[in-house]
Image (spheres, rainbow, N blue to C red):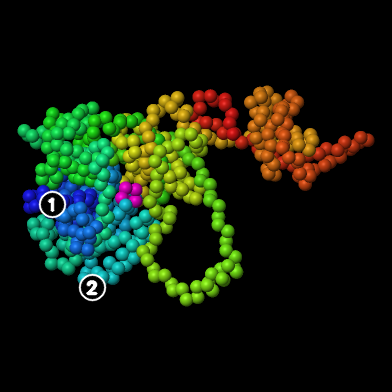
Amino acid sequence: NLSAMAAARVLNVNVGVLGHVDSGKTSLVKALSTLLSTAALDKHPDSRKRGITLDLGFSAFLVDIPEERKEEFKDYDKIQFTLVDCPGHASLIKTVIGGAAIIDLMILVIDVNKGIQTQTAECLIIGEILSEHMVVALNKVDMIPAKSRKDKIAKMKKKLQNVFKRTKFGKEIPIIPTIAAPGGGLLHKEGKKSSTDAVTVKDLMKTLTATLKIPNRIAKGKFRFAVDHCFQIKGQGTVMTGTVLEGMVSVNDIVEIPSLGLERKVKSMQMFRKPVQSAKQGDRIGMCVTNLDAKLMERGIVCAPKNIPTIGAAVAVVNKVRFFKGEVKTDTKFHCTIGHSTVMASAVFFGNKVKKAAEKPAKKDEEKKETKEAKPEAKKKKKGKAKVPKKYQKVVYPAEFDKSKDYSWHDQLLGDSKEHPPGSQFALLRFDKPITCPVDSIIVGSKLDVSTDSKLCRIAFSGKLLGEMKWEPSVLETYKLYKTRERVGSVERLQDDYTIIGKGLFSKDTDMTQFIGLKVILDNGLEGSISASFGQTGKFKVSFINKIPENLIQTTKSEGKKKKVKRTMQAKIILPLKKYVFSLDRKKLLQ
């Protein structure tokens, strides 16, 4: 009833439906949906011909707000779940990432007879990157004989919980048995919409409604709209369908298509074929404009005029995906997906070690004993919801990149550790062709040239853009990335209690003036600085602020009548140096 919908205050929630190919995603969406868009349920001719989803599909269903949650959802009368049906085939992972970028929550569809498969794992990784809430649909349970069904479902749930406890979603994630198409899809071929089986999709709908958190919708901010489908209507204009990412838009507003350099007026808008005058962040709409060739705009971004730049390079904060088995090397090319766009980009990785926080002093045994005695009747706390291990929790990215710091060049992106926690590594990205995107976009880097028959994870890293840049020498120099190297020499003898003579760091032709004042470290723990050259053979003096400890000095007497005493040390002299990678002054020495 469209007139009733128009009067109601509807909260739109975008739900990504992801999973391995042939896990029953589209059948599940078909069983759930009551409202279909122009791009729903495998409308692409090749999708029907091949029997698999080749593109994003959009449909929806409406539910009433449960009585127990009406106070929480007091600003709304109904909830509309917009389902984004993502392809499951390995070759279409770019489309999946683009679809996941617009969702509020995710349904991960798993075939109960097969469990976690290759693309299931990749979809789970995408969910960790792009979604905060997930529900698992354990599909095709009707394929299990009734006698053994209960036990097999319980075993599969336990197996999956062991997987999910190592993700940010935790082991308490809802896992709902479903039958999307009893009889392997025969139900839908016969045009039926109901099943005699006790397991239906109703439990999944109830779980979505019961566990839903109200998405943070902000009408303020400049309008941004992710277009996923574009088509012509004769006599009306061109319709661009998609999801409002930020801000709001109204009929008669001027919008820009930055990739085409065009501005157009919004003639009309619909939300699942219902006319609307405005739309805000999170809404799924069709926007009609005039004088636009639909063939020029399949996917992309529409925005408020002069809002989104087209960039050729960017700096980003990045994290290595822990399931990616290969090395993520600097100066290697990756498929970088931002929204619905995927372009090749070369990456330079860098970052600094994070210093460990001072540890709290351990309690003494006596203090522990006193604590126990003070609470002899303390009851054991009831087990609450299992906490997700810290290393799998949500990554909090920095808001901006600090160009005032020096950063260590990385030959490869390092896995998360105490020294390199999430958010501490960065990348300079140079795109093979310019990409139109907001400068705070989420980015996913993949190696999609790996064979689709391979069982290896292809998603290498994820992160967030922190700003655009130009790939020019003068700009690159402002990014203070350095490499370290060492020169190693040895102690020849002591000149006095505060000075040693060293050798082996320099040749006789070295210009010593540029090294005077640089710090050196001895492998016995002493630290000093080069104070002068000594002689003509490349030897040098190292001075120390404090007197050299006697226990480090060896004394020898020479043979002969005079028997001179020689004081020396058995130690290596290390001269640490660092070099700015992008410095235009190649000869400059730094520490």
Q: Describe the element under mark 2 as helix, strand or loop.
A: helix
| Residues packed near mark 1 inside 10 Å, few (<14), some (14 to 19) or many (20 plus) | few
Is 2 left, or right, of 530 in this rendering? Answer: left
Task: Specify the label residue 8 is tagged with.
Answer: 1
Measured as percent of width and height from the top left, residue 430 is found at 38, 32
Q: Residues within 10 Å of mark 2 (few under 14, many from 20)?
A: few
- Disc number for residue 147: 2
Residue 417 point in image, percent of width and height: 48, 50
Q: Give x and y (percent) for residue 7.
A: 11, 50
Q: Residue at x 13, y 49 (%)?
A: 36
Q: Is residue 434 among what the camera can see?
A: yes
Quadrant containing the C terminus is top right
The type of residue carrying mark 2 is Lys
Look at 55% across and 52% down and name the residue there.
358
Inspect the magenta stretch and tell me whether residue 384 lies in it: no
Q: Which residue lies most toward the right here?
A: 561
Q: Secondary structure at mark 1?
A: loop
